[in-house]
Image (cartoon, coloured by chain):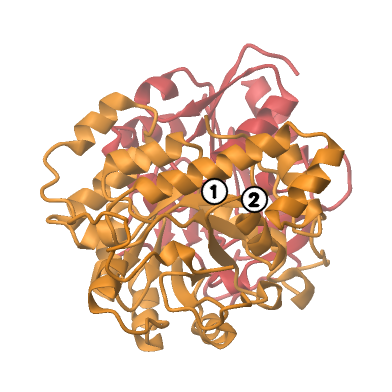
Amino acid sequence: MTAGKSIGVLSLQGAFIEHIHRLKQLTDATVLQVKTPEDLEKCHALIIPGGESTTISLVAQRSGLLEPLRAFCNNPNKAVWGTCAGMILLSKEATKTMRGGQELFGGMDITVNRNQYGSQIESFQADLQFNCLSTDESFNAIFIRAPILHSYDQDKGIIELASLIDNPIDDKLAPKGNVVALRQFNKMCTSFHPELTQDKRLHEYFLKEIVFKL
Amino acid sequence: MSAENPTIVGPAGGQSTQKNGKGGDGSIGTFSVKSGLAQMLKGGVIMDVVNAEQARIAEEAGACAVMALERVPADIRQEGGVSRMSDPVLIKEIIDAVTIPVMAKARIGHFVESQILQECGVDYIDESEVLTPADEQHHINKHQFKVPFVCGCKNLGEALRRISEGAAMIRTKGEAGTGNVVEAVRHERQLMADIRKAASMEEEELYAFAKDLQAPYHLLKETARLKRLPVVNFAAGGLATPADAAMMMQLGCDGVFVGSGIFKSGDPLKRAKAIVQATTHYQNPKILAQVSEGLGEAMVGLNVDKNLKGGQFAQRGW
């Protein structure tokens, strides 16, 4: 794939190495760990990995990265993809956060419920059907203490990329609870972890359809 | 220096069960799901807490998980007696108090304590040498649980034996409750040296090395191929300062446990925050210097020798 773009992976806490390795398999573009505001300035695109969203948010705050990240995620000319914790941080509103609330980055007009699927023993794998990937085979997705989509703004250009067959929780609690992958222009989120499986197609999609079209 | 890319697979070497649709029984508690949570904890600090108030302080400090236990290791040393799993009431209070994952300790070999902890809804169980062992020959058969397990090790052989029993995460043991990092360093260096040795061996040599290590050959071969443990590896046992945490990260672990070091210090919140920052920015001496300033009193450290009160916990486990 074409080079010339710098893609950062937010590397404060969580599964960032997995994303970095996957990106390096797929592109000659510069791939870098983002731990400071100076690192972020070099990036055209950013992946916010899975991890603990409260930890990532608190460490970002204490590392002087919170406002730069907010500006980056809300800049329409930057590409951002959040997986699991990254989806929470990309949302404009999240419920069930720690006491005293949690700072979010924003960037997508979505509302999520944190850890709605329950604790670790309710974590699961499921096959998903996408229409936008390079092949039609199903995508085996790993959900770990995953956030669930509550709802999204209908008129903001958001498209649904993949859904579970049923809504795993009550429609009243989360009317859009079965939607697990979304895109809003140059921003994208998945409530599962494509970086934990061998399937490269979602990373390819992010690079080809978003990052290299910036 | 941290070894790269764990493409983590189950002990059988394959991706686990898959099923169509959401969460049928076949797709819950797979090894990918169990080891996957450990991957989400990487680069983070897991803190020992004995009640909901401490758990909230740990969360506010930026802990990526908390470990619920009855007494912190420093108190177990001082008070002696048999140490067991926490009261389920305390564990439930801790689960209700925080949004981050909650781990809890069970005694080595005590599979019923583990059944109870799974029922309480903990996110991870630590089959821990810090508690008094319940079985001096057998560890828990961890494959039989939906909840994942973390286990301690002093070297590669011990780590691979635990993974073979189903552990989805490993921590080096160090010497808990001492505030002395020397044993944690010893075990991490031993583990890394064993891995480097395995990675340079020919297949014939690996068979012989597996015998020496008393480790299953297929797991040793996988370790040699990956040039790292096939599951996430944290450091533990005696870490008390931001510098200790960053040192363990530079030696190649994926994250750290801090036990007595936080709540036995003069200013737990400030120290906990500093250790979290140090674990993220472990390669940045400028930030390490900043966060190490003015932390107040560290926990009292103990020398690890034959007079160590409570004995060496790291010798427990087989």
Estimate the spatial distance between the alpha carbons at disc 2 and disc 1, rounded to whole Å.
7 Å
How far across and how far down the image is residue A14, in percent? Answer: 50, 46
Visual hue assigned to chain A: red
> Which part of the image, by quadrant, shows the N terminus of chain A?
top right
Which is nearer the N-term, disc 2 or disc 1? 1
Numbered badge on residue A90 = none
Q: Is residue B97 visible?
A: yes
**Which residue has dot 1 on it?**
A50
Using the image as rendered, state which of residue A57 and residue B244 is in the foreground: B244
> Residue A73, located in which quarter of the rendered image?
top left
Relative to the observer, which residue lies in front, B310 or B99? Answer: B310
Q: Which chain's residue wears label 2?
A: A
Left or right: where A17 falls relative to A59:
right
Would you say the residues marked 2 and 1 are in contact, meaning their CB atoms lie under 8 Å apart?
Answer: yes
- Relative to A53, A205 lies left or right: right
Three-letter residue code for mark 2:
His
Residue at x 63%, y 61% (from the top left corner): B168
Say if residue B254 shows up in the picture. no
Q: Is residue B310 above or below residue B297?
A: below
The residue under the point 72% across, 15% down is A2
Within-10-Å neighbours for mark 2: few <14, some 14–19, many 20+ = many
The residue wearing badge 2 is: A193
Rendered hue of chain B is orange
Above-or-below relation of A184 to A100: above
Mark 1 falls within which chain? A
Q: Position of residue B78 (x, y in %)?
A: 23, 73
